[in-house]
Image (cartoon, rainbow, N blue to C red):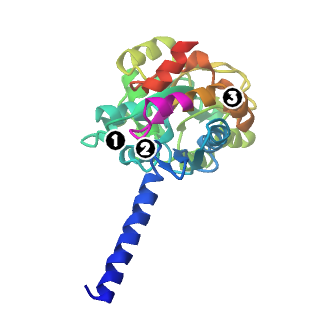
């Protein structure tokens, strides 16, 4: 064999070896020089998922010997599910309704079902908030026929929430002027008087709603209990919740609504052993999540199965059954 050929073969082998190291470094169950690499999908850096994911990574690095976990900013739930499916991340924060759609091949995952997803735990509620200005005079979701409603971006979890909730009131998109806007866009349109209602699904208090309330008196529209019960019977990932009075300045009424749950979800790279270690580390140090963000105070052992829309990781289930 010519020397030049040997060099080419050697170089190709080196590239292949580097690719193998890079690939195995992305798998939660793979060791590289004694290190366990774990990528955690979160959301945008300005949102809730990112600081919670960062705190989780810190806990895992400190409490699991040889762990090298990192939080990764992503496009949130839908993007996280797709990345879990192909193994580019190992854990992620995902809304339980999005996880349900992905596992069952419905809504934005029609013909794109994602296999191998397992729940670690439900974390905290993300409440469906229908926001209007007090000046609109709207007090009930039953009054939305003919109104301009910012229903969320096309293909988003928020848009699915709006469609499902309004259907429980006997209202379809044919009955309203549906505006497919992200909540940032919807909030701006609400302030400018270009829509009558803007909808978001997020933990409260939500900064965007606080911003609106600081400039214009707002009203949150309730989801009445009987409607919530019918909705939950059809879509078991919803839970009932109450937005406390005074959550937003100038609006001092408690508001019944429904919520989906933010979940910690594992992909196929997280086996039973690693799932157990991850769950034990996080739920033995919840004080660190509470210090990372206000919603951390809502993460408790009591609600780990609330709205659980996936089979649980065997290791997580083992840990919670021990106590």
Q: Is residue 18 left or right of residue 284?
A: left
Position of residue 241 measured from the top left corner of the image (x, y, whole percent): 57, 19
In front: mark 2 or mark 1? 2
| For the residues bearing labels 2 and 1, Cβ distance under 8 angstroms | yes
* Residue on which disc 1 sits: 108
Image point (44%, 16%), residue name: 227
Q: Which residue is mark 2?
A: 78
Front residue of 30/188: it is 30
Q: Return the x and y of residue 266 as percentages of the image width and height.
A: 45, 36
Can residue 306 be seen here? no
Magenta span contains residue 273 = yes
Q: Is residue 133 above or below residue 320?
A: below
User: Which residue is at 36% across, 70% downward?
Assistant: 13
Quarter that holds the N terminus: bottom left
Q: Is residue 172 magenta?
A: no
- Which residues are the magenta region? 264-277
As rendered, which of 154 and 213 lies closer to the eye? Answer: 154
User: Which image quarter: residue 233?
Assistant: top left
Of residues 72 and 148, the one nearer the viewer is 72
Q: Which residue is found at the position 67% from the left and 42% from the top? A: 58
**Whole-percent x, y for residue 320 in the image:** 54, 17
Question: Of the numbered discs in the image, which one, if any, rests on residue 285?
Answer: 3
């Amino acid at each position: 064999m010519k020397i030049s050929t040997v060099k080419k073969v050697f170089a190709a082998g080196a590239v292949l070896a580097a690719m193998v190291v890079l690939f195995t470094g992305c798998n939660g169950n793979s060791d590289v020089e004694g290190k366990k690499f774990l990528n955690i999908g979160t959301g945008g850096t300005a949102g809730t998922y990112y600081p919670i994911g960062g705190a989780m990574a810190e806990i895992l690095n400190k409490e699991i010997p040889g762990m090298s976990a990192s939080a990764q900013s992503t496009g949130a739930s839908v993007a996280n599910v797709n990345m879990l499916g192909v193994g580019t991340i190992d854990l992620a924060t995902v809304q339980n309704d999005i996880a349900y759609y992905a596992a069952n091949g419905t809504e934005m995952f029609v013909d794109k079902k994602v296999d191998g997803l397992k729940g670690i735990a439900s974390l905290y509620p993300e409440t469906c908030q229908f926001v209007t200005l007090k000046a609109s005079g709207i007090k009930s979701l039953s009054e939305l026929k003919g109104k301009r409603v910012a229903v969320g971006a096309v293909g988003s979890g928020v848009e699915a929430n709006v469609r499902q909730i309004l259907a429980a009131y006997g209202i379809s998109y044919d009955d309203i002027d549906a505006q497919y806007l992200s909540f940032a866009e919807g909030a701006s349109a609400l302030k400018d008087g270009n829509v009558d209602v803007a909808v978001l699904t997020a933990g409260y208090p939500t900064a965007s709603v606080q911003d609106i309330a600081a400039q214009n008196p707002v009203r949150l529209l309730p989801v009445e209990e009987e409607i919530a019960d019918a909705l939950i019977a059809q879509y078991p990932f919803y839970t009932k919740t109450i937005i406390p009075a005074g959550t937003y300045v100038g609006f001092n009424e408690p508001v019944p609504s429904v919520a989906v749950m933010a979940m910690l979800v594992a992909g196929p790279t997280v086996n039973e052993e690693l799932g157990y270690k991850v769950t034990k580390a996080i739920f033995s140090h919840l004080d660190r999540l509470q210090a990372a963000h206000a919603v951390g105070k809502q993460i408790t052992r009591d609600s780990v199965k609330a709205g659980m829309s996936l089979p649980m990781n065997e290791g997580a289930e083992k840990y919670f059954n021990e106590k």
